[in-house]
Image (tube, rainbow, N blue to C red):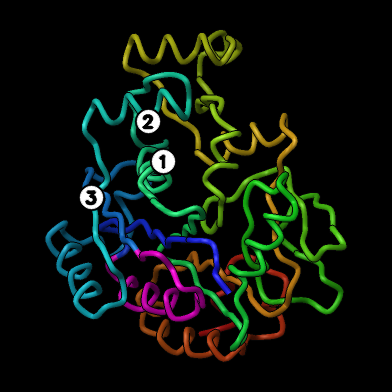
C-alpha cells in the first residue's frame, strides 16, 4: 500500500541540550512511519523570555555538535537552521498573518517564525511536529500516524491530529483537558490548539490562514482595548509589544472556523510532556523512556498530559 508522504520536523535549541540525545532518538524509534525525511530545525537566535534561565543551557556550537551526531547516526536525515533572513520573514508572515511582523519569538521565547518555517519548508503532503522534550508510547505493529492520516482524509474538517494526551484511563477521561467532544470515528474534537505535537495536512492548514495576531496584555488598558489590527500597527511602527503564543492564535482561528483539532482516542499510542528539568530527572530520563516504550507507567499518571515527576523518580 502506498502511504501519503509525511515528514517529521523537530525544533531544537540550546535549552534542549540536557535531554535531546535521549528524547529525539526515542521519538524517531516510536514513530512508526516511512517518513519522506526526518529533519532537525535549529534555532540559532539569542535566547529570550523564560528560556534564558532554563537549566543546562549550552552553547550553539555544542548544540550543532549534538545534531551532527544524530545525523551521522542516521537518526535524522537533515539539519537546517531556521531562516531569519528579513525578506523570508516578511514573505512567510505576510502569508500566515497578512502582516510583515518583526517579532520572531513569543513572550516566552518560543520561535513563532521557526514554527512557520518548519511548516513552509516541509516538502511532503503531511507534516508531523514534535517538541524535542516530548515522550511517546506506541504499541508495536501500530502506527498512530497512519490512523490519523486516514481519519483526516475521511474528515476534511480535522485541522490536526495527535496521539492520546497522557496514558489512557479506564473511562477515557483526560484530566488536564478543557471541553471536548468524542466522535464515534475514534477521536476527540477540540476547538483549541496545542503546539507540542501535531500532524497536519499542509493544504488543509493553508485554508486556515491568515491567523489573527494576538499580543500579550498591556499595562495600559486603553491600548489593550484597541482592535487587534490597531495594536499590531502600533507595535510595528514603534517596535513595541510582545506576541502571545502561536497556539493561542491558532486556537482563536479554530474557534471562528469550521475546523477543529483532533486527539486520537486509541489506547495504542499516547504522549507525555515532562516539565521537570532538574538534574535528578535528567539522570532518570533513560529509564523513564525505557518504561514508556514498553507501555509501563504509574497508575496515577493515567489521563494526565504532563509527566508527574514524583510518580516516576
Give the magenta-colored segment's residue range.
17-38
For the residues labelled 1 and 2, the Cα–Cα distance comes to: 7 Å
Closest to the camera, between mark 3 and mark 2, is: 2
Report the front residue among 291 and 55.
Answer: 291
Indicate whether 200 appears above or below 138. above
Residue most toward the left? 61
Q: Residue at x 52, y 45 (%)?
A: 202
Decide: is 61 above or below 136. above
Residue density around tag 1, few if under 14, some if 14–19, many if 20 or more, within 10 Å:
some
At mark 3, the secondary structure is strand
Please report contact status of discs 1 and 2: CB closer than 8 Å, yes or no. Answer: yes
Tell me which residue sits at (53%, 12%) in the image.
229
Q: Depth check: 260 or 301 in front?
A: 260
Identified at 20% across, 70% down, the residue is 66
Q: Position of residue 73 (x, y in %)?
A: 23, 80
Q: Which residue is mark 3?
A: 81
- The picture quadrant where one finds residue 148 is bottom right
From the viewer's perspective, tell me whether residue 234 is left or right of residue 87.
right
Q: Which numbered circle lies on residue 116?
A: 1
Is disc 1 placed on a helix, strand or loop? helix
Q: Answer with the quarter of the image where residue 56 lies.
A: bottom left
State how far apart marks 3 and 2 are (Cα): 16 Å
Residue 212: quadrant of the picture: top right
Return the residue at label 2: 92
Instruction: Look at the image and say whether residue 19 sits in the magenta stretch.
Output: yes
Answer few, some or many: residues within 10 Å of disc 3's Cα (few below 14, many 20 plus, some between 14 and 19). Answer: some
- Pointers 3 and 2 in contact (CB under 8 A)? no
Amino acid at each position: 500500500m502506498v502511504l501519503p508522504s509525511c515528514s517529521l520536523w523537530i525544533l531544537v535549541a540550546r535549552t534542549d541540550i540536557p535531554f535531546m540525545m535521549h528524547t529525539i532518538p526515542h521519538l524517531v524509534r516510536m514513530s512508526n512511519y516511512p517518513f519522506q525525511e526526518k529533519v532537525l530545525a535549529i534555532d540559532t537566535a539569542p535566547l529570550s523570555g523564560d528560556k534564558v534561565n532554563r537549566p543546562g543551557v549550552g552553547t550553539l556550537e555544542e548544540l550543532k555538535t549534538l545534531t551532527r551526531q544524530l545525523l551521522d547516526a542516521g537518526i535524522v536525515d537533515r539539519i537546517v537552521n531556521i531562516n531569519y533572513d528579513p525578506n523570508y520573514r516578511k514573505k512567510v508572515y505576510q502569508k500566515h498573518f497578512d502582516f510583515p511582523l518583526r517579532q520572531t519569538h513569543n513572550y516566552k521565547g518560543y520561535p513563532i517564525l521557526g514554527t512557520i518555517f518548519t511548516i513552509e519548508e516541509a516538502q511532503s503532503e503531511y507534516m508531523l511536529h514534535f517538541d524535542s522534550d516530548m515522550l511517546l508510547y506506541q504499541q508495536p505493529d501500530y502506527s498512530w500516524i497512519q490512523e490519523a492520516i486516514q481519519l483526516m482524509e475521511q474528515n476534511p474538517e480535522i485541522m490536526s491530529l495527535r496521539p492520546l494526551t497522557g496514558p489512557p484511563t479506564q473511562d477515557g477521561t483526560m484530566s488536564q483537558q478543557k471541553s471536548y467532544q468524542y466522535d464515534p470515528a475514534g477521536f476527540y474534537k477540540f476547538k483549541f490548539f496545542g503546539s507540542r505535537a501535531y500532524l497536519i495536512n499542509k493544504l488543509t492548514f493553508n485554508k486556515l490562514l491568515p491567523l489573527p495576531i494576538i499580543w500579550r496584555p498591556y499595562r495600559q488598558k486603553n491600548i489593550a482595548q484597541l482592535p487587534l489590527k490597531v495594536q499590531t500597527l502600533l507595535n510595528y511602527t514603534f517596535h513595541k509589544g510582545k506576541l502571545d503564543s502561536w497556539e493561542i492564535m491558532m486556537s482563536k482561528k479554530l474557534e471562528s472556523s469550521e475546523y477543529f483539532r483532533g486527539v486520537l482516542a486509541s489506547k495504542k499510542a499516547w504522549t507525555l510532556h515532562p516539565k521537570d528539568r532538574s538534574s535528578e530527572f535528567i539522570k532518570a530520563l533513560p529509564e523513564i523512556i525505557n518504561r514508556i516504550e514498553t507501555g509501563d507507567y504509574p497508575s496515577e499518571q493515567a489521563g494526565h498530559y504532563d509527566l508527574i515527576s514524583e510518580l516516576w523518580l
